[in-house]
Image (cartoon, rainbow, N blue to C red):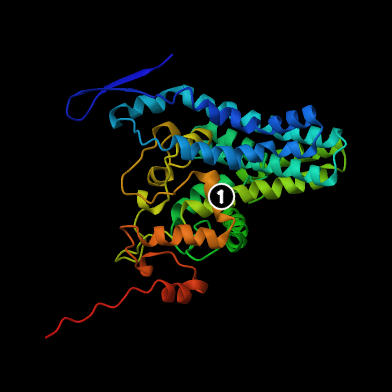
Amino acid sequence: MSVVYSAMDGGGRAVEYRDRKRWAWSLSVVYPLLPFLGIAAHAATGRQLALALPLLISYGLMPLLDALIGEDRNNPPEAVVPQLEADRYYRWLTWATVPLHFVALIGCAWWAGTQPLSWWAVLLLGYIAGTDSGLGINTGHELGHKHTRTEQWLARLVLAVPAYGHFTVEHGRGHHRHVSTPEDHASARMGESIYRFMLREIPGGIRRAWQLEAERLESIGQSRWSVQNTMLQSYAVTLLLQLGLLAAFGWVMLPFLAMHNVVAWWQLTSANYVEHYGLLRQRLGNGRYEAPQPHHSWNTNHLVTNLALFHLQRHSDHHAHPSRRYQSLRHFEDLPQLPSGYFGMFLVAYVPWLWFRVMDARLLALPTVRGDLDRVNVDPKRRAALARRYARPATANAPG
């Protein structure tokens, strides 16, 4: 059953809008259950390698569908956005996704703990569970930007699955403030591989989150170890969950959960890496950076992966308007555009020479850059080499 939103625009004209993706957004809800396809394939065939089916779907089928189906540049009219955001159906989808992340992790742990798997199959299943829990960070991202008490608590709960309870603090109060500047460890620099980025991004996020939360608690007269510490609330759920799995399924959970946690964190690192690579906000005359604009994030409108990720890939509008709900995020013309959805771009990022070959020229060709490295967030260790490689030819003097 479709829903039609009606309103009057600024010119007094009647506007109607029907979200043709309304029911397709449920892909974001069921996608966390993908590991069960691998478990079913293993149960049916007896082949442990069949557990890898979710990886084949995510990193093979999804990029292929993005390429075949292409982009969706449709935007809801601004006049109906208040109605669209007030439609509780969309937030119910994000709420329903939270318990499914718990179900997926517990289901994978149960299979690892009750089946006679080889050591490599246990690690493989931990890897698959980790990629799935990385999606939980995406769910927590959507919920954590909302200002209702319910959604803030749901964000803490779902972030307990990947053991990333500091994310909402770090992302909302840290990354969004410093995005696309050299000061932001969650914004990748031109010439920086994802592996070097990881060494800066993960510890930097933890340190900044603790500092920000300690400052907030101090301002209200509380200790950083107070029960009001939102990160500790999420970490407590993580502790109960993972100790419970250890008690239920034994010591095999140690390598399984270690792999799960590392890969879940790696999923966020992968997203952060592709979202702002090389983009730079300019300093103003007062020494501050300009406000984040849509062109300070890489965007992609590929339909299928956006439906699986609650529109995360319309990242440009998200950073310009962080509290806007996923169903209302907009496409803008002339934005930095990734050539594929996130699943495809992750694979490219994992091969640094290929990433640089694909993205560096695209970055320098942006209308906000035009080949000027001073308008790029460049890795200081690579600046000299990049300046030599991409040096612009000198303009010849006109004859007198």
Q: Residue at x 50, y 66 (%)?
A: 191
Q: Residue furthest top?
A: 1
Mark 1 lies on a secondary structure that is: helix
Q: Residue at x 67, y 43 (%)?
A: 162
Q: Residues within 10 Å of mark 1 (few under 14, many from 20)?
A: many
x, y (%) of residue 245? 80, 37
Three-letter code, disc 1:
Phe
- The quadrant of the image that shows the C terminus is bottom left
Q: Residue furthest left?
A: 400
- The quadrant of the image that shows the N terminus is top left
370 up-or-down from 137: above or below: below
In front: 282, or 61? 61
In front: 59, or 139? 59
According to the picture, the residue beneath numbered tag 1 turns out to be 346
x, y (%) of residue 232? 66, 45
Q: Residue at x 45, y 39 (%)?
A: 302
Tell how many labels: 1
Q: Quick check: 328 left or right of 212?
A: left
Q: Residue furthest bottom?
A: 400
x, y (%) of residue 129? 70, 39
Res 132 seen here: no
Q: Quick check: 396 left or right of 294?
A: left
356 up-or-down from 88: above or below: below
Give the image quarter of residue 350. bottom right
In front: 371, or 260? 371
Q: Quick check: 232 left or right of 182?
A: right
Give the image quarter of residue 238. top right
In front: 342, or 240? 342
x, y (%) of residue 139? 56, 36
Q: Residue at x 34, y 29 (%)?
A: 81
Give the image quarter of residue 78. top left
